[in-house]
C-alpha cells in the first residue's frame, strides 16, 4: 500500500471554494455599505455638522447640524440601560440561582423571554404608546396632577422604557450565560464557609459575571441606538428647537432623523449629504459606544484574572 | 469499640440517602472521634463523598435528594428544623477535591469567611496570618498577599483552601479527596499538614489513595456500594481487616 494520491478530493475543493465565496460575499456587502456611506457622507463631516444645532435649517446641507440628535440618542441609550440593567440582571439571577431548573414557572418565564425576543419592533412601539404613555403616564397624571398632562404624552423616559423592554431578552440571556459559566465549585466554597446564598451571589457570583453582564449591555446599547420603530410613537420628535432638559421632554434621535430626512424632505437631492452624514454619525456613535463597552470589559476581565478586584 | 469513641463529636446513625430514586447510602453507622482523622475509603460511587457532604448539609444544594436516619454533632441533630445551616457550615468546614480559590487576592481568600462574620482591621489581619501559618503557606505567601490566588501552584492553592477553611475556626474539617489533582510533592505537604491540624480540628477525609489513608488517618471506614463494610482503627484495617472485601480493596484486587 502506498500513500500516493490517486485522485483529487474534488468535493473538498468545491466546498472550500463555495464557503470562501459566501464569506467573501458577506465581507463585500459590508464593505460596499460602509464604503457608500463614507464616500457620500464624508464631505458633510465637519465640526459644525456634528456639534451644530438644527435651528438654522434642518434640510440645508450647509447649515444643518446633528448635535441634538446625538444628544437625544445618547440620553435615550443611557436611560434605557439604567432601566434594563437591573431588571435583566435580577431576572437572570432568579432563573439561574433560585428557580428550580425544571419547574413550570421557570419554563414559563423562559418561553416568555424567547417570545419577547421575536416580537417585531413596531409592536413594541405600539405597546409603549398604549402601556407606558396612556396607562402608566396617564395614570400618574390622573393621580398626582389632577389630569393635567405631564407624563401622559411621548417622552424620553417612555421611549427609554419601551426600548428597555425590547432589549430585555438579550440582557437576560447574556447575563444568564455568564452566571452559568461560573464554576459550581466557587459557589460551594462560599457556602461551605458559612456564607448565605445572598452573600455568595453578591460577593462571588456577581463580580465574576460582570464581563458577561457588560456584554449584554453592549448588545442592548447597540440595538437601542439603532432601532427607530419603538420610539416613533413614544418620544422621538420630528423637530425640536431645544435640547431635552427633563425626562418628560421629547427628544430628537439620529435614527428617526434619518427616517425623517429620507421621507419628509422637500428636496431629496439637496438633503442627501445630510442624510449620509447623519448615517455616518450614527454608525460612528454606535461604534464608539461598543468600543467603550469592550474596553471596559477587557479591563475588568484582566483585573479579575489577576485578582485585584 | 475504642475508648476515644465513647464521646464522638459526630455520630451518624442508620443513615439512608437517595438521589431521586436511586439510593446512595444504606443504613450507615459511624462515630467520629474528636481530634482524630477519619478516612473514608472505597471504590468510586460507593457513597463516601455523599456521606461527607451530609455532614455539612451540602447535599441540600442538589435537587431531589433526601435522607433518613440521624446525624448528631455534640449530641445535637444537625438536621433538626431549628438548626441554622449557615452556623453548621461555619463549624463544619470543607475542602474540595478541585482546589477552588476565589479569583481574588490571597489575603481576600482567607479573609472571605471572616469578613462575612464582620471581622475587620488588625483582628482580621491577625486571623489571616495565623491561618496561613497553620496551613504552612505563610512563608511562601507573606510577600505576595495582594497577588491573585490563581497565580499560586496547584498545591499552594489547595493549602490556601485549607487556610480559608480553618480561618473560620471550625471544629470539624471535611476533606473531599484533597490531593487527587496534586503531584506527589504537593500531596506529601498536604498530608503533613493534615497531621499538624489534627491537634486543633477533627478531620474527615475522603481518599482514593490507600497509602494516604494509612499514613494520615487514625480511623478508617471502608464503603462498598453504599454500605459501610468495616470501620476500625486504621492500623487494624490495614494489617488485619475483618472482611474479605476490605482486604481485597486495600490490597488492590478490585476498585
Image (cartoon, grey):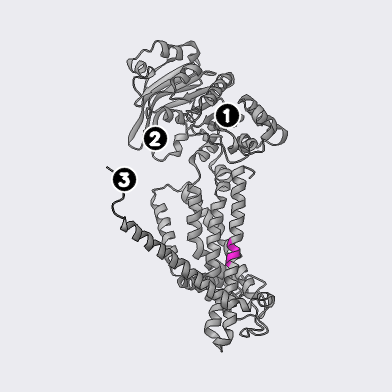
* Residue picked out by circle 1: B159
Dominant secondary-structure state across the stretch colored magenta: helix
Please identify the quadrant where the N terminus of chain A is shown: top left
* Residue picked out by circle 3: A3
Left or right: residue A136 versus residue A107 is right
Res. B125 mark:
none
SS at circle 2: strand
Q: Is residue B34 above or below residue B121?
A: above
Res. B66 mark:
2
SS at circle 3: loop
Q: Quadrant of residue A288?
A: bottom right
Query: For the view shown, which residue lies furthest in the left direction?
Result: A1
Q: Is residue B5 above or below residue A53?
A: above
Q: CA distance from mark 3 to mark 2?
A: 61 Å
| Residue stretch rendered in magenta on the structure | A286-290
Q: CA distance from mark 2 to mark 1?
A: 32 Å
The label nearer to you, 3 versus 1, is 3
Amino acid at each position: 500500500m502506498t500513500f500516493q494520491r490517486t485522485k483529487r478530493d474534488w468535493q473538498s475543493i468545491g466546498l472550500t471554494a463555495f464557503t470562501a465565496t459566501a464569506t467573501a460575499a458577506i465581507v463585500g456587502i459590508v464593505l460596499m455599505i460602509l464604503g457608500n456611506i463614507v464616500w457620500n457622507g464624508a464631505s458633510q463631516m465637519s465640526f459644525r455638522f456634528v456639534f451644530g444645532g438644527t435651528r438654522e435649517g434642518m434640510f440645508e446641507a450647509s447649515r444643518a447640524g446633528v448635535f441634538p440628535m446625538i444628544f437625544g440618542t445618547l440620553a435615550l441609550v443611557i436611560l434605557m440601560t439604567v432601566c434594563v440593567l437591573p431588571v435583566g440582571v435580577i431576572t437572570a439571577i432568579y432563573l439561574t440561582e433560585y428557580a428550580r431548573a425544571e419547574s413550570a414557572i421557570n419554563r414559563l418565564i423562559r418561553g416568555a423571554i424567547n417570545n419577547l425576543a421575536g416580537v417585531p419592533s413596531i409592536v413594541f412601539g405600539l405597546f409603549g404608546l398604549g402601556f407606558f404613555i396612556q396607562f402608566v403616564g396617564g395614570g400618574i397624571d390622573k393621580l398626582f396632577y389632577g389630569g393635567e398632562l405631564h407624563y401622559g404624552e411621548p417622552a424620553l423616559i417612555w421611549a427609554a422604557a419601551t426600548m428597555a423592554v425590547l432589549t430585555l431578552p438579550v440582557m437576560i440571556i447574556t447575563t444568564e450565560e455568564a452566571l452559568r459559566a461560573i464554576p459550581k465549585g466557587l459557589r460551594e466554597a462560599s457556602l461551605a464557609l458559612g456564607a448565605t446564598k445572598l452573600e455568595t451571589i453578591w460577593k462571588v457570583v456577581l463580580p465574576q459575571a460582570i464581563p458577561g453582564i457588560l456584554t449584554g449591555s453592549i448588545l442592548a446599547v447597540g440595538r437601542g441606538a439603532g432601532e427607530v420603530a419603538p420610539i416613533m410613537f413614544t418620544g422621538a420628535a420630528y423637530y425640536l428647537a431645544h435640547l431635552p432638559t427633563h425626562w418628560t421632554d421629547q427628544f430628537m434621535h439620529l435614527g428617526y432623523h434619518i427616517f425623517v430626512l429620507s421621507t419628509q424632505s422637500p428636496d431629496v437631492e439637496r438633503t442627501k449629504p445630510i442624510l449620509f452624514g447623519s448615517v455616518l454619525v450614527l454608525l460612528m456613535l454606535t461604534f464608539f459606544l461598543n468600543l467603550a463597552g469592550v474596553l471596559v470589559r477587557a479591563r475588568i476581565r484582566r483585573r479579575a484574572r489577576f485578582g485585584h478586584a | 469499640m475504642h475508648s476515644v469513641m465513647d464521646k464522638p463529636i459526630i455520630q451518624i446513625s442508620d443513615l439512608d440517602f437517595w438521589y431521586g430514586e436511586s439510593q446512595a447510602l444504606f443504613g450507615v453507622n459511624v462515630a467520629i472521634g474528636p481530634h482524630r482523622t477519619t478516612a473514608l475509603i472505597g471504590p468510586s460511587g460507593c457513597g463516601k463523598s455523599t456521606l461527607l457532604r451530609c455532614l455539612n448539609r451540602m447535599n441540600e444544594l442538589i435537587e431531589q435528594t433526601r435522607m433518613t436516619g440521624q446525624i448528631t454533632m455534640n449530641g445535637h441533630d444537625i438536621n433538626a428544623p431549628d438548626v441554622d445551616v449557615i452556623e453548621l457550615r461555619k463549624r463544619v468546614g470543607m475542602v474540595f477535591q478541585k482546589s477552588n480559590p476565589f479569583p481574588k487576592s490571597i489575603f481576600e481568600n482567607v479573609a472571605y469567611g471572616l469578613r462575612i462574620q464582620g471581622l475587620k482591621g488588625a483582628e482580621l489581619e491577625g486571623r489571616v496570618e495565623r491561618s496561613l501559618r497553620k496551613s504552612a503557606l505563610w512563608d511562601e505567601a507573606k510577600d505576595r498577599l495582594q497577588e491573585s490566588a490563581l497565580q499560586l501552584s496547584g498545591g499552594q492553592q489547595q493549602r490556601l483552601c485549607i487556610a480559608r477553611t480553618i480561618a473560620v475556626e471550625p471544629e470539624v474539617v471535611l476533606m473531599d479527596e484533597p490531593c487527587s489533582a496534586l503531584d506527589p510533592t504537593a500531596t506529601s505537604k498536604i498530608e503533613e499538614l493534615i497531621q499538624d491540624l489534627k491537634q486543633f480540628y477533627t478531620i474527615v477525609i475522603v481518599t482514593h489513595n490507600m497509602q494516604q489513608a494509612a499514613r494520615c488517618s487514625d480511623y478508617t471506614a471502608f464503603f462498598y456500594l453504599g454500605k459501610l463494610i468495616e470501620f476500625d482503627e486504621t492500623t487494624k484495617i490495614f494489617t488485619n481487616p475483618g472482611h474479605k472485601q476490605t482486604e481485597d480493596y486495600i490490597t488492590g484486587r478490585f476498585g
